[in-house]
Image (cartoon, coloured by chain):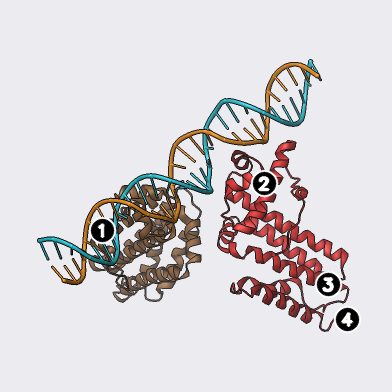
Chain colours: A brown, B red, C orange, D cyan
Amino acid sequence: MPKQEMTAEATRDAPAQKRLRADARRNRDKLVEVAAQMFASDGVDASLEEIARRAGVGIGTLYRHFPTREHLVEVVYRREVEGLCHAAEELARDHPADAALELWMQRFVDYIATKRGLATSLRLLLTTNSTLFSDTSGRVSGAMRSLVQAAAAAGKIRADVDASDVMHALGGIYSAPNTPDWRERSGRLVKLLMDGLRFGARG
Amino acid sequence: MPKQEMTAEATRDAPAQKRLRADARRNRDKLVEVAAQMFASDGVDASLEEIARRAGVGIGTLYRHFPTREHLVEVVYRREVEGLCHAAEELARDHPADAALELWMQRFVDYIATKRGLATSLRLLLTTNSTLFSDTSGRVSGAMRSLVQAAAAAGKIRADVDASDVMHALGGIYSAPNTPDWRERSGRLVKLLMDGLRFGARG
DNA sequence: CACTAAAACGGAGGTGCCTCCGTTTATTTA
DNA sequence: TAAATAAACGGAGGCACCTCCGTTTTAGTG
């Protein structure tokens, strides 16, 4: 279980967001941070009052910022997707292109792992709120695309596949049954996939 | 809003159901009946305590019979589908084949009407519990099939369509936006469909 | 019938949800 | 800097959820 380890300032949604007062901002960020932990450990049904408590604010404050549980879940979810995509850029900077891709996919597996328990509620949220779905899936596949293209351009992986193929291959992770060894199996899947991608590369 | 008007004894699931004690049986039936009304009027989030109260039992009794809200919703849902299918047989007995089909489709519209508000929760339930989905959709399309076949056999409607086509045509009802005139529009759709079906019939 | 085991009843109680509103704090204006 | 105003804070209160368990009822047996 990898810590997400993200600083609070990640929550900078620039648009049309009326300038928040300093304290409000602080509290909001803290709430999101705590909620992310609680959702990860206890599922989306984690107690909102407990979240408020741990964030050191009253329950009223939580509700002012996030009128429903779904709002909070959505913000946390977006933040995590954001983190995942940001990691892609970072990995691309710090590693050879093929290693970056592999590391990112492993991280993707980690990410999915934390989401497995939440499947049904998340599915509801994603079918209800279709912009959320298109926004985030767009973000994620965008991140993947640039990693794949970079690796292909550097000759580290074969050039005759594109990102959506890889994404599709990774799809098996979702649908795989939730066995205890799911994690390992998914890890192997990623390695296997990388071998396939490296095979026949120019470099 | 048509009353469903079903007697309690409709809940006779013969299989493997350990013989219930008389009082338990009574209470259970009453609970389902009241729940059906409450879900229809207040949505699936109707208060369980209120349901128990109106059924004249304690909350504990409700929970013993239906350990979760979903259990109760599922039973009510199945019962309603059952009623819908039963109506098909009845209509087939009491009316000419084409009229039976038309009346049943109108009733189907009524039925969907009561479910419109519940769309998201029901969808979750139906995707989560896939046997529920296949059971009920099988039942419903079975009912429709026999009505269509009977009408075709009697020469009251054209013989070159099958039940799944009609079902598909009715599908528009689901997806139509929830405008105030939805009900009328759906009624007209059914009439239109029937005209189409009658056109070119032998009889 | 009376007795008894098994099963059902039902409500008290602990917890969480969410609203409402009086209090406190930050920002703006003079 | 002080006063005024706007905004955020936070907890009390009311309601619903669900569990637990002592009490009551039923169905079977001598």
Q: Position of residue B146 (x, y in %)?
A: 80, 66
Of circles 2 and 3, the one toward us is: 2
Residue at screen point 61% across, 49% down:
B71
- The residue tagged 3 is B99
Q: Is residue B197 visible?
A: yes
Q: Are marks 4 and 3 in contact (CB under 8 Å)?
A: no
Rounded to the nearest angstrom, the CA distance separating label 4 from label 3 is 16 Å
Q: Secondary structure at mark 2?
A: helix
Task: Determine if marks 2 and 3 fall on one subunit.
Answer: yes
Q: Position of residue A124 (x, y in %)?
A: 50, 61
Q: Quadrant of residue B64?
A: top right
Task: Give the residue at the far bottom of this rendering.
Answer: B200
Placement of the C terminus of chain A among the 4 image quadrants: bottom left
Rounded to the nearest angstrom, the CA distance separating label 2 from label 4 is 49 Å
Residue A163 or residue B15, whichever sits in front: B15
- The residue tagged 4 is B202
Residue A133 or residue B22, whichever sits in front: B22
Rounded to the nearest angstrom, the CA distance separating label 1 from label 3 is 67 Å
Q: Please rate how many residues cluster around mark 3, counting C-alpha atoms within 10 Å: few if below 14, some from 14 to 19, many from 20.
A: some
Rounded to the nearest angstrom, the CA distance separating label 2 from label 3 is 35 Å
Q: Secondary structure at mark 4?
A: loop
- The residue tagged 1 is A26
Rounded to the nearest angstrom, the CA distance separating label 1 from label 4 is 76 Å
Q: Secondary structure at mark 3?
A: helix
Could you tell which of marks 2 and 4 lies nearer the N-terminus?
2
